[in-house]
Amino acid sequence: MAKLKIYLLGRVDILLNDESILDKLSHKSIGILTYMAEQRNKKFNRNKIADIFWDSNDFDTSRYNLRYNIWQLRKLFKQKNEKIDPFISDKETISLNNNIDIYVDVEEFQKGVENQDINSLEKIKKLYKGEFLEGFYIKDSPEFNDWVFYEREKFQRNYIKVLTKLKDSYKERREYQKAIKILEDKLSINPLKESLYLELINIYIQIGDRNKALHHYNRCVKRLREELNISPAIEIKNAYKNIMNRNNKRDIKEIPESKLINAKNKYSNLYIIKEYDKEKFRENSIFLESYPLGAIEYYVLSELIDKIAKIYDQILLNIDDSDLFNICFVNSKVQRYIKDKDSLLNMATKINIFKSLENIIKQISLEEHMTIMIDKFKFIDNTSLEFIEFMLYRENVKNIKIIIISDEYNEKIKKLKNIKGGKNEY
Amino acid sequence: MKNIDLILYNGDILTIDENLSTANWIAVDKGSIIDIGNNDEYKKYINNAKEKIDLMGKTVLPGFYDSHVHLVQTGLNLLSVDLSDVQSIVELQERIRKATYKKPEGQLIRGIGYDDLRVSECRMPTRYELDKCAPNHPVWINRVEYHISSINSMALNSLNIPFDLEGIIRDERGLPDGRLTGKASAYIRGQILNNFSDSIRKKGVNKALDLAISKGVTTVGALEGGFVFHNRDAEFIINNNTKFPIDINLFYQTIDVDMVKGKQLNRIGGCIFLDGSFGSRNAALKEDYSDQKNNKGRLFFSQEELNEFILNAHKENLQITVHAIGDRAIEQILNSYEYALTKYKRENHRHRIEHFELPSDEHIKRAKDLELVLSMQPSYEYYWGDKGDLYDKRLGERRKKTNPFKKIVESGLIIAGGSDSDVTKIDPLLGIHTAVNHPNKEYSISPIEAIKLFTINGAYSVFEEDIKGSIEIGKWADLVVLDKNPLKVKKEEIKDINVELTLKQGYIIFKNKGDIDG
């Protein structure tokens, strides 16, 4: 039996016995076949079809054109050695022959839209490869094109219904990454829908990824500003305030005691955690990454100063010029906080830089708890490692945690473990 | 005496240097001015110059700056069908039908400047009406201010429109009728502009630049990307900046500071709209519009949002500018600059305000205290400033307070002149003319001050005063030769002065049909 597969969701394709025959069909023939396939149990009035595809006042011409296109389709079937006639027709009517094994993707899609089961919905989602008859247009057939617009909207609506059900199910099952992916699919259809950004923000807040929540807030703000010149809705602004509210930050109390490696240090809490644990603690930390950069000293400290400037700029405004001058040698960004810019800049020694940075961290820690997290610790540059040692040894900053991410015990960690403390001895 | 590239002599040269001195000749080598002088001193170069131009008494000025141009959109609009004067939808259909004869089927036809309030039907065309005149071309008609648009069926088919987008007008069957407002119009605009290929942008921009050069412009401040426009316009400028025949200084119209920094640009903004325009009655005013009670226009940013953006960009050492027209919007941006500069003192920032059309005396003082640069468009007054014109209709008596150039110049503020093309055409001489012949006489400035708006002040407004903006030894030989001296003709005739030659770094890039042998 002839097997005809017609794909209408996304770019149209028509397969006869698993071979695409699209390039063998005229534009109008594709239109006629897709129009009839989408409503394949219907018997069509020949005049009506002729009118739809040949919007002309010349009745005979349009009837002739229809006959010609139908004949071509029949011929193609014959050329493919199919004995079965794809159409059943008489003088007045025409319909697709139900004796052909016809698969039309939209039929399967429509049947599945009302499903509740997550597996079925996932399958249905995959059927939607794009808009209904995407990019397909017949120049002088306004009725056909209007039909396409109507169907396109109908299927898009149903697709969104499927996406919404899937997203809700994923959220219920706490499969947040999958829910996020669905929200992105919805955003690709309508990138101006603010409620979708809000949902993304809320999911990221829920899973504790403050940075990603902020990213989506900023993405929403930028999109609305650049495309509509408007601010986001009050709900999104509130969500933003919620993210920025420091009282809302999670504290790192979950670090197991066993991972504490330097109990002797009175004030600073130093922890070592494994790579796979880092996302748990990253959210409220100053997150620094080390790289194997060879002899570039102060690399991690420069990054630390960069982050401090971003997060605590208000505090930097009140820091003494002398301290700011010293750390300028590590990162010139702090120059902007210097009040008396005409002062002479003397070369700072390493110890001066360390002390100044310690002062700044101390100042911040007076106002709130501070967590510094260093990833890929084995690559930390020697001077930055020395500074961590200095901080732990001095025990001058009370309200701070230092978390080191390392899957191995190495010489650098050993150095930290051996610090005895005692601020007056440095 | 060594060989030099070019000598221009026998001229009436206004150097616009600090002393506003004049000269008769200029010697140019390797793109720069190497000597300048009076009388016959040029003769020491004449035998060694590869090229000689006898100016025959014509006037030379530094090449003009147009500090506010939407260059890519100007270019794209030059490739579009102008509908600004159609009086009915039938006439629009005829104009579009004619355009179909000139374009291959399937290529987009864009109609611009259409004003639905001026046509007899008082509405935008539907897709059925557009299908009738252009069944085989996608068509996109923009209302004059881009907030409403119409597309035909072919265009509708080629776009993926979210069904739930606000602003899709529907017919009695519930199908989109082709007219789009608000979010839908903005979304479609984004999609269509995104689909414009860079080769189309190139074609348009080249056309626009040719026009600019014929008006003596050698440097353009291009305000690209963002709302109403498209970020691809800005990217186009970034990607091609070394290929243009004149200098283009990009202002990226975004609030994304990180993105701008990432692209290693040193300025941000442009027409980031704090308010709208007088024409559409949404420029933000302190008092109601004279022709619409209870309407004071609107602000598109909250003070808090604007402060955050300005502070963020200021901290990152960027030069900033935004669009502020009405007194309420001007107030808002002044507040934000004050906020940022109080928090982080920064010398020589040269932050700008674009338009600054209706400032109060206090605004001028505050702008001066902040050391801002004002980027203004004098020719607005030419089109809208007289009794009965737009300013009069919208603002009533307040029209006597618009664009107070003299007050601003006297306060010591720097004004950079621009056209806001394609709101008004790129034509610095028209700008100079209008600044001198301001409809409100007390705001008129002298011709020499007006010339500075489009030369040295333009250069200052983008940190280029050391290399351009005046005719001095060591500076680039960006020059414009005029058939008459703006300081010597009757002030009412400045706009009729013609550009004879435009030179970019000593190369003639435009030559009029006049009698100079270039």
Image (spheres, rainbow, N blue to C red):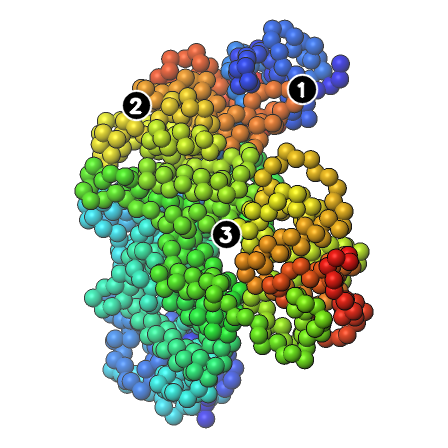
Q: Nearer the viewer, mark 2 or mark 3?
A: 3
Residue B288 picture location, percent across and down: 22, 40
Disc 2 is attached to a residue of which chain? B
User: Relative to residue A164, is residue A326 depicted above or below?
Assistant: above
Q: Which residue is mark 2?
A: B439
* Mark-to-mark CA distance, 3 and 1: 42 Å
* Mark-to-mark CA distance, 2 and 1: 41 Å
Classify the position of the C terminus of chain B by image quarter: top right
Identified by mark 3, the residue type is: Asp
Residue B314 picture location, percent across and down: 52, 43
* Left or right of residue B85: residue A250: right
Identified by mark 1, the residue type is: Ile
**Image mark for residue B256:** 3
Asked if residue B148 can be seen in this view, the reply is: yes
Disc 1 is attached to a residue of which chain? B
Q: Which residue is mark 1?
A: B34
Q: Earlier in the sequence, mark 2 or mark 1?
A: 1
Same subunit: marks 2 and 1: yes
User: For the residue carrying disc 2, how many other residues have a C-alpha within 10 Å: few (<14), some (14-19), or many (20+)?
Assistant: some
SS class, disc 2: loop
Residue at point 23%, 44% (across, down): B295
User: For the residue carrying disc 3, how many other residues have a C-alpha within 10 Å: few (<14), some (14-19), or many (20+)?
Assistant: many
Disc 3 is attached to a residue of which chain? B
User: For the residue carrying disc 1, how many other residues have a C-alpha within 10 Å: few (<14), some (14-19), or many (20+)?
Assistant: some
Residue at point 57%, 31% (across, down): B464
Residue B4 picture location, percent across and down: 70, 20
Which picture quadrant has residue A137? Answer: bottom left
Residue at point 37%, 38% (across, down): B330
